Amino acid sequence: VSRGKGQDLFLHSFFESLQLIREEKLQAPPMYAVVVGSDMSAHTKFETQLREFVSEKKLEGHVIFVNKTLSVIPYLAAIDVLVQNSQ
């Protein structure tokens, strides 16, 4: 998790998408965002900001932070959309 990887942009877009779905009363399956590569033991300011954004926007039930892992296959197998953006 780092600013250059654009997780902040992704989470803002994810939040806006959920808002639009609610406002327009659209039918959509439950949506979740998984941020893989978390490292709260490093206590980075950026990750703290991401977690605060999730809390402020009440996204705790929709956003999951997963610690750094070399075993990404289970996550790749479970997703419908992969976002790998960078700034």
Image: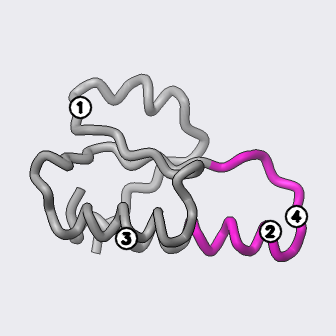
Per the image, label 4 sits on a secondary structure element best described as loop
Please name the amino acid that badge 3 sits on. Answer: Asp
Q: CA distance from mark 4 to mark 3?
A: 25 Å
Query: Which mark is on residue 22?
Result: 2
Q: CA distance from mark 3 to mark 2?
A: 21 Å
Q: Mark 3 sits on what residue?
A: 8
Per the image, label 1 sits on a secondary structure element best described as loop
Picture residue at 28% right of the left edge, 75% below the top: 87
Which comes sooner in the sequence, label 4 or label 1? Answer: 4
Q: Mark 1 sits on what residue?
A: 69
Q: Is residue 16 above or below residue 68?
A: below
Q: Is residue 27 above or below residue 76?
A: below
Q: Mark 3: few, some, or many residues within 10 Å (few <14, many ≥20)?
A: some
Picture residue at 10% right of the left edge, 52% below the top: 42
Q: CA distance from mark 4 to mark 1?
A: 35 Å
Per the image, label 3 sits on a secondary structure element best described as helix
Q: Position of residue 53 (x, y in %)?
A: 42, 70
Q: Mark 4 sits on what residue?
A: 26
Which comes sooner in the sequence, label 1 or label 3? Answer: 3
Q: Mark 1: few, some, or many residues within 10 Å (few <14, many ≥20)?
A: few
Please name the amino acid that badge 2 sits on. Answer: Arg
Whether label 1 touches label 2, CB < 8 Å: no
Picture residue at 24% right of the left edge, 56% below the top: 1
Q: How many marks?
A: 4
